Image (cartoon, helix red, strand yellow):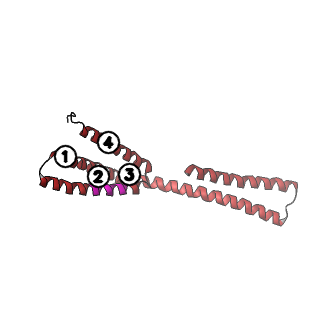
Amino acid sequence: MKNLNWILAALLILVAIGISALVVYITTTRTLTPVESILWQILVFAFGLAGSFIFGRQSAKEAAKEMIKPHARSAFRRLVSLYESLSRASTAIQLTENSESSEDIRVTIAKLDAIVTEQLNTADDALEDWRDIVPEDVEELKQKLESKIQGGIDSDSNPTNSR
């Protein structure tokens, strides 16, 4: 979609330049009437303005994105650290819940699991907010965390795995 906007802007500007060249050619062969002159000017203006508007909008979006990235990266790293920490806590709670038999400990672990799950959901929401600013980093993080979680589940389900 982004490349399509750049192509459309360039095409509109090229059409405006082409119309201008056509007008110059026509005026060398004959004199334009005032109505023809105005119509040609309107066409050149419309195509040039539309192309410039699209090009300017895309350029402004790119510039804003590049300006905010350095400021967002540090906050994003803190979010990543929080997310990984909560994931480790959740895994530890699940392991403790499966290995203990005391009812009080199970209730406590269930409560902690609910809290951690809520915090993970909040972190997921925050990541979705970050997706607008740094979508590549968010996607990379999600893939890393899914592989870590899957790796943790695989190693946890293997009783011969020594730690």
Residue at image coords 20%, 45%: 95
The residue wearing badge 2 is 82
- Mark 4 and mark 1 lie on one chain; the one further toward the N terminus is 1
Q: Position of residue 49 (x, y in %)?
A: 66, 60
- Mark 3 and mark 4 lie on one chain; the one further toward the N terminus is 3
- Mark 2 and mark 4 lie on one chain; the one further toward the N terminus is 2
Q: Position of residue 21 (x, y in %)?
A: 77, 52
Give the answer, above or below, for where 159 lies relative to 37. above
Give the label on residue 98, or none.
1
Give left or right: position of 52 versus 38: left
- Mark 3 and mark 2 lie on one chain; the one further toward the N terminus is 3
Instruction: Label 2: state its secondary structure.
Output: helix
Q: Quadrant of residue 13?
A: bottom right
Instruction: Label 3: state its secondary structure.
Output: helix
Nearer the camera: disc 3 or disc 1:
1
Q: Quadrant of residue 112?
A: bottom left
Q: Are marks 4 and 1 in contact (CB under 8 Å)?
A: no
